[in-house]
Amino acid sequence: MSRKLRVAGKLLLEVIILLYIILFVYAAASKLLDYGKFRLDLGQSPMLTSYAGWVAWMVPAIEISVAVMLLIRRWRLPALYAAFGLMIMFTTYIIVITRFSSFVPCSCGGVLQHMTWNQHLMFNIFFALLALAGIVLYQRQPSEHPAL
Amino acid sequence: MIMKKASFITILSILFSSIALVTLLYFLSIQHNYGKNNFIRMFPPHVTVTQRVMDLHSRDRYIAGGTSKYVYVVNPYDPLELYVADHTFTDTFSAHISIPPATELMMYGLHIEVDSPYVYMIEGLTSTVLRGSLSDLQLTPCIENPHISSSQAIPVSATSLVMRTYDRKLHQNILTKLTTDTSGRRYAPDILKKQVDGVFCTDGMLHYNANPPYVAYVYFYRNQFVVTDTSLNLLYSGNTIDTNSTAKIKPVEISSTGTTSMAAPPVYVNKTSCVSGNWLFVNSALKADNEARKQFSGQSVIDVYSAANGHYQFSFYLPDVEGHKVSSFRVFGNTLVALQSHYLIAYQLKFPDKFFRDRGLQSPAFPSLPVAGKAHSSAVPF
């Protein structure tokens, strides 16, 4: 691999990680800032209503943890895996709730509130692919940072 | 090789386990949400649209009934004057009910019931039942010598009515059907179940639906309702979604007057209710776990049950009007008409199709309207 490509790859990895940190910190913060409303909204979701109590604090907690892990170099790979898993879960949730659930909750506001469900779906798939790219790029780096 | 074999396997296993976890959550939620006595309400979005508000200038009005086009409101102090309004309240007029001359009626025990295409007048004190066509409002006696000894009586045909009566031997309320042409009285002592004193604990609301024909009785103080055919044979006994199975009332006998009264305010479970076609609508007094106090206190919650089997379907809210909650309501086709203090409010119902499709049910009374479901939401955890 040429040196140029390797530098570009490294830069791209940094950009992906930065995007993920911004995304997760923003997502978690906006949930926690209006925690009461977020909890209530989850309670109205036909899928999550029974679990709204613990899902409401677990989701922002996990988002913050992943963001912190992404900051720490040696934890980057597991963090990228976790980010990928999270994005797949959110994507599956959107697919299940829009296609199979008995009704689609409509409580307007919150994170990325101007997106429709479909835009949300595309956004999530895009980010899941970014995480995949991140994992590949991380492993192609010269092994100055040993992968766990 | 674009990536190492090991990380490829890791990615695949994360992919599948993530999908599996959320899918599992979905199947668990189906069981949980629709399970019996799990006190959680389901709120599909945009079920009701407030259409019109009409000021009746008095709280003493009741909804006598309606058709798919009109709703009929009666002033109990002037019961021969029928107030008629179409569902959008744009066409309103009043019509005079004529009764045979020399009919003796006690005005205060009199009730008008519109059951298209007829209008009935039931008067318990002199035991008079009159019936006429909605088109001309000329009432004539229809059930001869009915001997109504009841506060709640509903005509189910030209010759019969169902009512709630007091049984002296059993010391409790029972349901009775009165047929004047053939079989006479049929007592159904097993339909209402005594829990505490037999009178207060069995108190509730009697409903009749013509198409499909059935009689429903919804208890005030416990999470139950019973549905029978029009001959008062039990079809099933259903539960409302809360867990209040025993009437929480404290009746005391007042020895000086020999009457029974309440020692403590009763805990209402079902405040008001109605039936329409295949659905039973209940205005519950109890808050579900997934409702915020603020949400619950500023609105009236209506729970919808299938009248065919008593299964809970979903809930929706009717907002307070100037702080006034729903005191009574009726559903005609896809219009819900509610009395909120001196206001008559028409709500348009848009029931989510998916509900009926998922359960293999038909929603004949409600036209298929799109659910505004593709809207954005913060209920998505991301």
Image: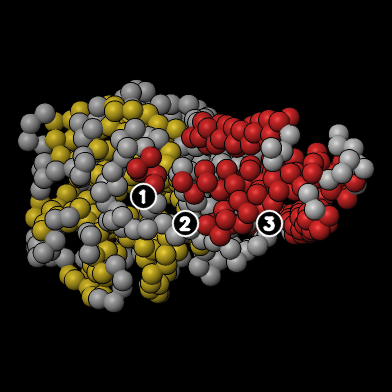
**In this orientation, which residue lies closer to the viewer: B362 or B321?**
B362
Q: Residue furthest front?
A: A2
| Residue A37, label in figure | 3
Residue at the location (7% across, 31% down)?
B182
* Kind of residue indicated by mark 2: Gly
> In the image, A83: left or right of A47?
right
**In this orientation, which residue lies closer to the viewer: B9 or B306?**
B9
Q: Residue furthest left?
A: B181
* Kind of residue indicated by mark 1: Asp
Query: Crowding near pointer 3: few (<14 within 10 Å), some, many (20+)?
Result: some
Locate residue B193, reporting x and y percent: 40, 26
Q: CA distance from mark 1 to mark 2?
A: 11 Å
Q: Residue furthest right?
A: A144
Q: Is residue B249 visible?
A: no
Residue at the location (44% across, 60% down)?
B372
Secondary structure of the residue carrying numbered label 3: helix
Tag 2 residue: B373
Secondary structure of the residue carrying numbered label 2: loop
Chain for disc number 2: B
Locate residue B95, reporting x and y percent: 19, 71
Query: Crowding near pointer 1: few (<14 within 10 Å), some, many (20+)?
Result: some
> Is B283 situated above or below B168?
below
| N-term mark: 1 or 2 | 1
Chain for disc number 1: B
* Kind of residue indicated by mark 3: Lys
Query: Crowding near pointer 2: few (<14 within 10 Å), some, many (20+)?
Result: some
Residue at the location (37% across, 34% down)?
B310
Locate residue B272, reporting x and y percent: 43, 49
The reply to whether the C-beta atoms of the residues labelled 1 and 2 are less than 8 Å apart is no
| Residue B353, label in figure | 1
**In this orientation, which residue lies closer to the viewer: B338 or B170?**
B338
